[in-house]
């Protein structure tokens, strides 16, 4: 379906830093996915849209889209939406100056979905920002890097509690 083309072109535009174009393409894809009744595609694309809006500094809009996607992930247990949502939550935490929790979320995702480090696009649009924020921290609190042991095995319903504690 053409919605997938808009989605893929949005991913390319986002990676190239063409954020306005990416936002337009993602929004078009989301509208098409909604009309087709394809929830996983809607909410995956909402996560990607939130990353792009975050990169534009549109934090409130990024948060709104991300929270919608995370609600779907939590209610349905849709694994990939939860993974992408936690990455988006890490970006929002960076915006709030909470690098420790951002790193913990990124580290937790790395345990749940080890392929995340090999997913070059995701690293370009999100992971590198999280890792750069962690490297720039003044404190040397390495406790966040031990987070995977605490986050590993968390059920979908527990994600809501983690997000509430993060105060997103």
Image: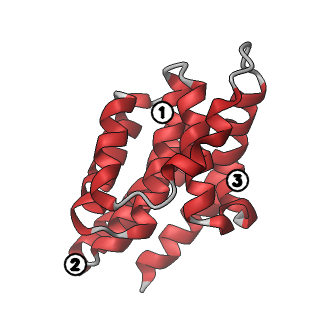
- Residue 57 seen anywhere in this rendered image of the structure: no
Which residue is rendered at x = 28% and y = 78% of the image?
38
Which callout, 3 or 2, points at the residue further toward the start of the chain? 2
Q: Is residue 27 left or right of residue 53?
A: left
Give the spatial CA distance, label 3 vs label 2. 29 Å
Give the spatial CA distance, label 3 vs label 1. 16 Å
Q: Is residue 147 left or right of residue 29?
A: right
Find residue 71 and name its label.
Answer: none
Q: Position of residue 145 (x, y in %)?
A: 67, 39
Which residue is rendered at x = 62% and y = 52% of the image?
14
Find residue 92 and name its label.
Answer: 1
Which quarter of the figure has residue 37? bottom left
Residue 63 lies, with reference to residue 99, above or below; the image says: below
Which quarter of the figure has residue 59? top left
Q: Nearer the viewer, mark 3 or mark 2?
A: 3
Q: Position of residue 1 (x, y in %)?
A: 42, 86
Which residue is rendered at x = 71% and y = 29% of the image?
142
Residue that badge 2 annotates: 37
- Residue 38 seen anywhere in this rendered image of the structure: yes
Residue 72 lies, with reference to residue 125, above or below; the image says: below
Residue that badge 3 annotates: 123
Residue 151 lies, with reference to residue 155, above or below; the image says: above
Label 3 Cα neighbours within 10 Å, binned few <14 / some 14-19 / many ≥20: some
Which secondary structure lies at badge 3?
helix
Q: Nearer the viewer, mark 2 or mark 1?
A: 1
Which residue is rendered at x = 76% and y = 22% of the image?
136
């Amino acid at each position: 379906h053409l919605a997938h083309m808009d989605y893929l072109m949005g991913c390319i535009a986002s990676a190239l830093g063409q954020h306005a174009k990416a936002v337009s393409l993602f929004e078009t894809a989301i509208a098409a996915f909604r009309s087709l009744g394809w929830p996983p595609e809607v909410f995956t694309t909402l996560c990607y849209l939130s990353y792009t809006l975050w990169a534009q500094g549109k934090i409130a809009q990024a948060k709104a889209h991300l929270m919608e996607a995370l609600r779907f992930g939590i209610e349905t247990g849709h694994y990939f939406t939860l993974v992408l949502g936690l990455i988006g939550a890490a970006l929002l935490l960076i915006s709030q100056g909470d690098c420790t929790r951002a790193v913990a979320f990124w580290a937790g995702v790395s345990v749940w979905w080890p392929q995340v480090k090999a997913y070059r696009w995701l690293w370009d649009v999100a992971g590198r920002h999280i890792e750069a924020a962690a490297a720039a921290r003044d404190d040397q609190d390495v406790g966040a890097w031990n987070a995977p042991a605490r986050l590993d095995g968390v059920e979908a319903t527990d994600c809501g509690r983690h997000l509430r504690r993060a105060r997103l």
